[in-house]
Image (spheres, grey):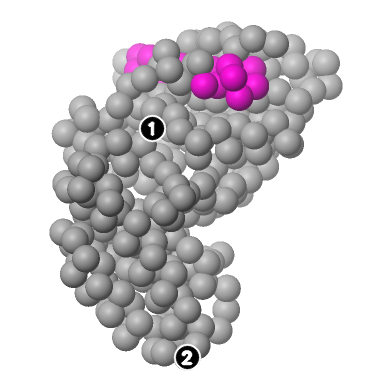
Amino acid sequence: MSLHIVRTVADLRAVVSAWHREGLRVALVPTMGALHDGHMSLVKAGLDRADRVIVTLFVNPKQFNNPRDLDLYPRTETEDALKLSEAGAHVLFAPGIDEMYPHGFSTRVIVEGVSEGLCGAYRPGHFEGVATVVSKLLLQAGADCAIFGEKDYQQLLIIKRLVRDLDIPVEIVGSATIREEDGLAMSSRNQRLSPEARNIAPVLHREMVLAAQTIRSGEPVAEALAKAAEKIVAQGYDKVEYLEMRGAETLAPLDTFGEPARLLAAAWLDDVRLIDNIAV
């Protein structure tokens, strides 16, 4: 099958309804475009779990608290469609803003608890925008499962929570972070790094791995993370916004290591905000 591009909710639902009548299982991969190998891994995960894969492409204005960030976000639909066709995706759903947020749209989805702290503290309104658009996409598509990358770990847990709370009949699947050879988590934002900053960027992941090792070996969490943050800045980052250890299932703050945990970080480099997380 060749890639089919649809732009309206009505057309998307017609396609999915026809697939379901055939007894086919459908996977959804929500994206904002500017696709890279990390996104392609989500498509593959969808193909592994379903008969048909829908990829959405919508640069959601409601999740950008910085208008400049929205303006700078790359728009590459033609290239994205080619990549998706080669990867074996079946449908690209690429709605316009008026299709997603028609005149008079006034609903917001707010997920409390797991959205607080970390990126939620530094990007006001971001997760409200994410939860709102993802709720819409899940309901529009009616897919059997939806695939999200673990790189945006807080986002993943927010989506799992809203699906449980709102009784949306879809399985949410987390897919492992895909990294460059030097350890940098793949992200569309990486395109904005200068060559010099791109060489520095892997420091974030490298120091997080070392911090996790020292925590597992018994060093106090606060000391290990403070040292890691200092080293990240000393090696070229502008600042570390946060570097914390949280419960892997709840994102509750942890100051001792004794349960499944993750290190989560956000740091600024070359006017670009990079995030990462790893299991401890």
Vertically, is 235 above or below 193?
A: below
Residue 160, percent from left and from top: 56, 49
Separation of marks 1 and 2 at Cα, in angstroms: 47 Å
Residue 233: x and y, percent?
A: 20, 67
Which residue in the protein does label 1 denote? 107
Query: In terms of secondary structure, where does tag 2 sit?
Result: loop
67 and 135: which one is in front?
A: 67
Which is more foreground, mark 1 or mark 2? 2
Magenta highlight range: 83-100
- Decide whether residue 84 is among the magenta residues: yes
Q: Which residue is located at x 43 percent, y 17 percent?
A: 79
Quarter occupied by the N terminus? top right
User: What's the residue type where badge 1 is placed?
Assistant: Thr
Q: In the image, is residue 209 part of the stretch drawn in magenta?
A: no
Left or right of residue 170: residue 259: left
Q: Residue furthest right?
A: 23
- Residue carrying label 2: 218
Give the amino acid at mark 2: Gly
Q: Quadrant of residue 129?
A: top left
Residue shown at 32% from the left, 62% from the top: 203
